[in-house]
Amino acid sequence: MIGKGRCSLVFEAKNEVSKRVCIKIEPCEDCSQITNEINILRNQLFDCIGVPKLLFDGETEYLGTMWRAIVTDVVGDKTLEDFSFGDRLVLEDVANQAIDILEAIHKRGVIHKDIKPSHLVFFQNSLYLIDFGAAGPPGPSDLVTWRFASILGHFKGLDLDEKSDFESLWFSFLSLHGKLPWDGVDQGNALTLKLRSKPCDLQQQYPTLANIFYPLLEAD
Ligand SMILES: Nc1ncnc2c1ncn2[C@@H]1O[C@H](COP(=O)(O)OP(=O)(O)O)[C@@H](O)[C@H]1O
Ligand SMILES: [Mg+2]
């Protein structure tokens, strides 16, 4: 097993020609997220840069329970969470790859809605975005991860959009430098601190990242 989600289990396996594949399963009785992911990977994001390819989907029995399963062609060796940046150029490159992926999925009408470091994985020297369980057209989501939630994501029922994904990506990259200003703070105060953590506010501290994210987050 290589990972565990809200109710999913994730495994690495080999296919019939010994290629590494990723298998993700979710119990059939509560499989709305994986079903959403299957539809999006198949209908909207097939052959999209930085997105795992859906190789198979179906049902399987495991530990006496029925599970909905998907097989994809990306098995990340590490996630952005495990990454440490010594080099400014590496940081720039990874941030630009992540932005390119978001721009590509947005062009196809998909907002990810749960961008965080553990959903960005490295595979064969490239970055991939995983977990499209909460993804969909612009609209609300109940599944946001508070630590990386965009400002709109703090308001239940408000529509998340392209900018919300970029904001969560900005917070994800900030978190690589250590604690986020709102770690350990309640939700109301976290929102205030996020409003004070735009790229223009942190230009002095993180010039490289701030310059990359400024054009994506400052324009309204
Ligand atoms: N293709 C993959 N390569 C490497 N790790 C993965 C892959 N897919 C999932 N994981 C790991 O498993 C965890 C849970 O998978 P995820 O798709 O986020 O499930 P959930 O929808 O339940 O949150 C991820 O955070 C990641 O650590
Ligand atoms: Mg997840």
Image: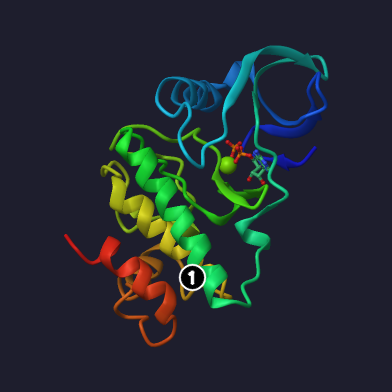
Residue nearer the viewer, 86 or 34: 86
* Left or right, 101 with reference to 177: left
Give x and y (percent) for residue 163.
29, 53
Give x and y (percent) for residue 87.
59, 77
The answer to whether one can see residue 155 in this image is no
Amino acid at dot 1: Leu
Eyeballing the image, is 89 above or below 205? Answer: above
> In which image quadrant can residue 90 be found?
bottom right
Give x and y (percent) for residue 98.
47, 54
> In which image quadrant can residue 135 be found?
top left
Image quadrant holding the C terminus, namely bottom left
How packed mark 1 is, by other alpha carbons closer than 10 Å (few <14, some 14-19, many 20 or more), is: some
* Disc 1, SS: helix
Residue nearer the viewer, 183 or 166: 166
Image quadrant holding the N terminus, namely top right
* Left or right, 185 with reference to 67: left
What residue does disc 1 label? Answer: 174
* Left or right, 190 with reference to 56: left
User: How many numbered discs sit on the rendered protein?
Assistant: 1
The answer to whether one can see residue 8 in this image is yes
